[in-house]
């Protein structure tokens, strides 16, 4: 078992050229286990309680007319439109994340053990990068490497390259968050539409109560129908909102993980492999201080 897990992690690291830092949580198997555990406890208790209380064990009759009032209506249709629109956007974003993941297998940087990158290697690596990714569309990883290599070719210092990678990762992450504004609005609009239907149903119920010519049975039937409309809109809207929020957070998590993996790829195979030809001001100062300390005893 341990050997298989090590082989699994090594295969993932080899395909993405990124060293894994933690074990991934298997969320879907845990979800299935949680559902099985809850159902195993709650279903027998529900059947036992229904057997002692026959009135509480009856289900509501879901006739075609009742289903039509539950699932169809102006507010429900508006919620469906918002949900489908947001689902299409999230589906496109998920496919884009999968496409971006393919850039880790393009060998954009030398990943051999012990490889070093000199300032003279920056321009050839940039040309190789453009040839590899030119026809495949933009990639977050390739853009991050391009900016980092361009900075290294000019400044010839690894510290500036690390700052460039960090800044570009923050820019890409902010761009991904900002581009989700439409989906965030739709996730907020669906419950608002449900509450709008609730207000409409309650208003129609109050208008029925003001009619003095209707009989008691007719009044109760009309009032119940309008109350069904009020609460059905909220039920459908909240159910769609729960599903949409889960999809939204799942896609956002994958996008954030993509940017973090791109940053780690640049740190492992670019920043840590750079060779500083020119010493920094701090190292020059320390070297001069050491020379002065060695020369001073001879002078005395």
Image: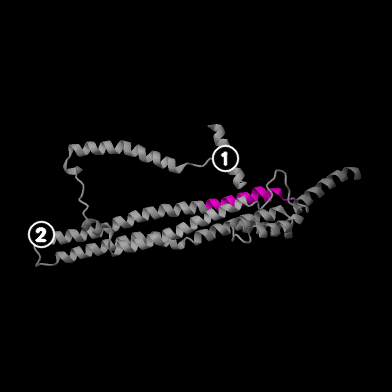
The residue located at (25%, 39%) in the rendering is 46
Asked if 7 appears above or below 159 in the picture, the reply is: above
User: Which label's residue is closer to the chain start, 1 or 2?
Assistant: 1
Q: Is residue 210 left or right of 231 when viewed as pictured?
A: left
Asked if residue 260 is among those painted magenta in the image, a careful observer would answer yes
For label 2, the crowd category at 10 Å Cα-Cα, with few meaning under 14, some 14 to 19 and many 20 or more, is few
Task: Write down the quadrant of residue 73 in the picture.
Answer: bottom left
Q: Which mark is residue 217?
A: 2
- Mark 2 falls on what kind of element? helix
| Pointer 1 with pointer 2, Cβ within 8 A | no
Residue ranking furthest to the front: 135
Asked if residue 54 is among those painted magenta in the image, a careful observer would answer no
Report if residue 20 is visible in the image: no
Q: Position of residue 153 (x, y in %)?
A: 73, 58
Count of numbered badges drawn on the protein: 2
- Chief secondary structure of the magenta portion: helix
- Mark 1 falls on what kind of element? helix
Q: Position of residue 258 (x, y in %)?
A: 55, 52
Give me the C-alpha separation between circle 1 and circle 2. 69 Å
Task: Write down the quadrant of residue 30 in the picture.
Answer: top left
Magenta range: 256-274
- Residue under pointer 1: 9
Q: Position of residue 221 (x, y in %)?
A: 14, 59
The residue located at (57%, 36%) in the rendering is 6
Q: Is residue 204 left or right of 22 when viewed as pictured?
A: left
Q: Position of residue 144 (x, y in %)?
A: 63, 57
Q: Quadrant of the C terminus?
A: top right
For label 1, the crowd category at 10 Å Cα-Cα, with few meaning under 14, some 14 to 19 and many 20 or more, is some
Q: Nearer the viewer, residue 242 or 279?
A: 242
The residue located at (30%, 63%) in the rendering is 75
């Amino acid at each position: 078992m341990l050997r298989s897990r090590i082989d699994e992690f090594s295969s993932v690291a080899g395909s993405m050229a990124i060293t894994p830092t933690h074990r991934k949580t298997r969320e879907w198997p845990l979800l299935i286990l949680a559902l099985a555990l809850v159902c195993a406890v709650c279903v027998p208790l529900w059947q036992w309680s229904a057997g002692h209380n026959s009135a509480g064990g009856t289900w509501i009759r879901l006739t075609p007319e009742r289903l039509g009032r539950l699932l169809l209506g102006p507010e429900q249709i508006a919620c469906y439109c918002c949900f489908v629109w947001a689902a299409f956007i999230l589906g496109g974003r998920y496919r884009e994340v999968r496409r971006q993941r393919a850039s880790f297998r393009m060998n954009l940087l030398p990943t051999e053990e012990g490889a070093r990158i000199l300032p003279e290697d920056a321009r050839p690596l940039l040309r190789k990068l453009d040839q590899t990714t030119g026809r495949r569309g933009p990639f977050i990883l390739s853009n991050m490497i391009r900016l980092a290599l361009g900075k290294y070719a000019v400044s010839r210092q690894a510290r500036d390259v690390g700052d460039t990678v960090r800044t570009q990762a923050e820019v890409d992450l902010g761009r991904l968050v900002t581009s989700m504004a439409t989906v965030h609005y739709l996730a907020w609009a669906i419950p608002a539409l449900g509450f709008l239907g609730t207000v409409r149903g309650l208003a129609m119920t109050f208008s029925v109560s003001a009619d003095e010519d209707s009989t008691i049975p007719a009044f109760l039937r009309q009032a119940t129908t309008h109350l069904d409309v009020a609460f059905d809109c909220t039920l459908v809207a909240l159910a769609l909102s729960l599903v949409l929020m889960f999809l939204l957070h799942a896609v956002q998590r994958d996008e954030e993980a993509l940017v973090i993996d791109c940053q780690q790829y640049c740190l492992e195979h670019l920043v840590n492999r750079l060779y500083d030809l020119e010493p920094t001001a701090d190292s020059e100062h320390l070297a001069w201080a050491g020379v002065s300390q060695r020369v001073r005893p001879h002078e005395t």
